[in-house]
Structures are given as C-alpha cells and as structure tokens.
Image (tube, rainbow, N blue to C red):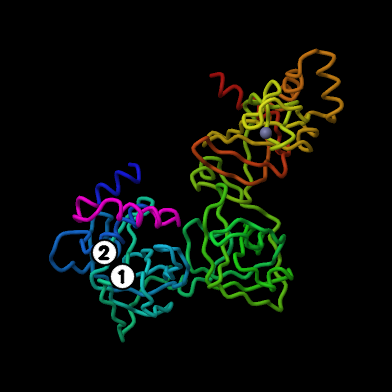
Amino acid sequence: MELDDHAEDLASDLGVDKEEVKSDLQNLVEYSVPVDEAKQSLRRKYGGGSSGGGAPSSKDIAEITPEDGNVTVTGVVLTSGKRSIRYQGSDHVIVEGRLADETGAIDYTAWEDFGLSAGDTITAGNAGVREWDGEPELNLGESTSLSFEDDSLDIPAAYADEIGGDAQLADLQTGDRAVNVEVAVVECERRTIDGRDGETEILSGVFGDESGRLPFTNWDPAPEIEDGGAVRIENAYVQEFRGVPEVNVSEFSTVTALDREIEVGADSTTMDVGEAVRTGGIYDVELVGNAIAVRDGSGLIQRCPECYRVIQKGQCRTHGDVDGIDDLRVKAILDDGTGAVTVVLDDELTEDVYGGTLEDALEQAREAMDQEVVADTIRERIVGKEYRVRGHLSVDEYGANLDAESFEESADDPEARAAAFLEEVSA
Ligand SMILES: [Zn+2]
C-alpha cells in the first residue's frame, strides 16, 4: 500500500482530515518508524483504539501472537535502553528492550519513560501488540498501566543470562537493542555526513572481540572510540547496513575505555551456505563450496571514471558516454549443496585466480580481439574446484553476495571432491 492509501484508511477509520493524518504519517515514516507502528501511534493520537473494547487478558509471553490487540503481561526486564527517533518534527526518546517470563521472551518499545531497569519484574497492563518482521512485539504507551512487582519472577537460565544485555559480537543480530559489548576498535575513521540536522561528523569503522568482528557507526563521536584500544559500550543497538548487522553507538550509549587488552578472534564463523544466507547477512563469515560457474561481467571489465560502477559498451547508466577504466573482477557462483552465493573477487584476488596482471589480461584480450577470453581463462581455472572463501555476506532482493577478502582452494583433496561434485551435478 502507498502512504496515501494508508492515510485514507486511517482518516476514514478515525473520522479525521486525511491531509492532516498524511502529514503526520509521512513525518513518522521518514524517520524510520515502521508504517504499522506509525499508524498505531496516530490511532492513539486521534483517539481510536487498535482493537475492540474490553479489558485485555493476562497472557504468557509464548502465547502472544501478532493478532492480539492488547494484552496484560508479567515478566522480567532483560534489557532496557534509550534511543532517539524523530516524532512529529521533534526528537522523541523511546526505551527499547526485551521482557521474559517462564515461557518466552518478547521485544518491547516504551513510548514513555517508565523507569524500566534490567532485572525489574513488571506487570504491563493493556500493552499493545504489534507485528514486526513476523514476530509480535509489545508497545508500552499512554494507555498502558505499568507496575513494579516486589517478588521477582523465576525465568529460565537462558533468559536470566541475558539480563543486563552483555553480549559478544558474534551473537548480535539486526534488531537487537540495549546491548553491551567489550570490544577493540580495529578500524576507525571520522566522516562528515548529511544528517537529519544538516552536516554532522560521525565515526565509523570495525569493532572486534574474541568472537569476531562487526562494523560500527558512532553517531556522537566518543573520544574513547577514536583513540582506539579497548572500550566497553553500554546501550548500543544493532541495525542492518548494506545487508550486514552494524553496531550503532548513539548519544544515549555509554562508552568507557578499558584497561585490559581484547584479543580479536582470528577465526571467522564457518557456516553452510544455506545457513549463512538465511541469517540475512554476516560481516565476517567463511564458506566452503564448489565454484560452479563464473558469471557474466567477470574477467576484464570497464568502470565509469565518475562513479566507479561497471559500464557496458562505454555507457554508464548514470553518466552516459564515458571513457572507461580497465579493471579485473570475478563474480563466481559458490554452491555447497545447501545453497548458493555469488562470490565477488576484487582486482587482486582476480589476478591470483587468473594467474596474471591487468596488463596480461589486456594483452590477451588484444591478441584474441575479444575481452571475454579473460573470463574464459578464469572459468577454466576455477569452475569445478572447491574453495574456502572468507568475507562479508549481504543478502537482498537481488540475491546473496559475498565480498571476498580471501579465496583459497580448499586443502582437503579438492580434485576428488570436485570430481564427485561434478558427477553429482551431471547425474
Ligand atoms: Zn558513472
């Protein structure tokens, strides 16, 4: 549905002016509030309820479904962290985290500051339920009656371990809120971006800990991060950026320098291709599979001098007729039987698998009067062999792409494996 239809919908439900609703809705959606959540906020603002009358029933967390309009829940606050979103033109602070009982755990968003702290046992009366990414979430707002219980609720150990939000980088997932990490700053640069309040300076780079590495953005540059070394960060949140989870350190996060050293794990996670694709994106992952094809647009290619994107027949999609820059690249399909990804090799890795430099490739193309011979040579060298690939996996509507940092022929008897694989494929 278009925004206009959503506005129409709301206006007729609530009996208010459509243009007014639409401008409110636009405001919320522009600041990344999901449209369903935005509509619920406006229903509250204009006095409508998100469900029919009657007091909501008390429910176990495991029983809550996105179809529940409002529920009453008792649980232990596992995490609680502030974050700022823009609401009707001004910054609005919300509190997010997770709540657990004996049966399960659920994410919540509190639109008012109820003073929730990790470890508190609370009862939220008349909490709204919304759907986010197929899962139910709680909305605690104006109409929620919140009380703190004197007796703390017993919850399973797996949830109890989550209280406070301490986590390792490898455990973080897109959508996680109010997490604490102790990390080494592996890379850090200061950048100027066009933010919602005009030009602003941020830090971006890579954090590492014993479990792995993840990219980060620090929206309010903290000197402790810029200085490098080891830091403890409290109340960070995880958002997807270019298909991989990214740690976001906001003005509400606490950053403290640590005295100890943090070893950054050298081992990336090794996963099945299918399993890796289902995660929706991982910053640092190792896959082992067979190169089953080399895609078009591999070998000797030309890039636009303006935007550096690949051009065809001297034409850039944005800049038109341009004088292209020669470059080498490989887009190979890697398959391990559980799934497939397109592995993208940069110029250096391509030189390795091609067995020659850019100049060699240009000469081969000149002699053959066809630049496709370079891709053909690469195809002959790698298709059918097994590779161990490490890099950044992103998954979007165009498929799964792995930006390779290393691409090595697998050590364990690749020829036997390749032969077996080809037999399987041709069978
Ligand atoms: Zn261009």
Name the residue at 28% across, 72% down. Answer: 142
Vertical position of residue 162 compared to residue 24: above or below: below
Q: Which residue type does callout 1 highlight?
A: Gly
Coordinates of residue 104 in the picture (x, y in percent): 34, 64
**Which quadrant of the structure image shows residue 206?**
bottom right
Coordinates of residue 171 in the picture (x, y in percent): 54, 60
Front residue of this view, candidates 52 and 131 = 52
Q: CA distance from mark 2 to mark 1?
A: 9 Å
Name the residue at 55% across, 73% down. Answer: 234
- Image quarter where the N terminus lies is top left
Coordinates of residue 94 in the picture (x, y in percent): 42, 69
Coordinates of residue 391 in the picture (x, y in percent): 66, 46
Vertical position of residue 142 compared to residue 276: above or below: below
Q: Do the residues bearing badges 2 and 1 touch, measured as CB atoms within 8 Å?
A: yes
Name the residue at 30% across, 55% down. Answer: 20
Q: Which residues are magenta?
A: 11-34
Front residue of this view, candidates 150 and 114 = 114
Which residue is label 1 attached to? 141
Give the image quadrant in which the ligand numbered 1 is located.
top right
Q: Which residue type does callout 2 highlight?
A: Arg
Q: Is residue 183 magenta?
A: no
User: Callout 2: helix, strand or loop?
Assistant: helix
Vertical position of residue 261 compared to residue 237: above or below: below
Q: Mark 1, residues whose alpha carbon is within 10 Å: few (<14), some, or many (≥20)?
A: many
414 left or right, relative to 126: right
Q: Which mark is residue 44?
A: 2
Front residue of this view, candidates 335 and 41 = 41
Direction left: furthest residue: 54
Name the residue at 62% across, 42% down. Answer: 287
**Prevailing secondary structure of the magenta residues:** helix
User: Callout 1: helix, strand or loop?
Assistant: loop
Q: Which mark is residue 104?
A: none
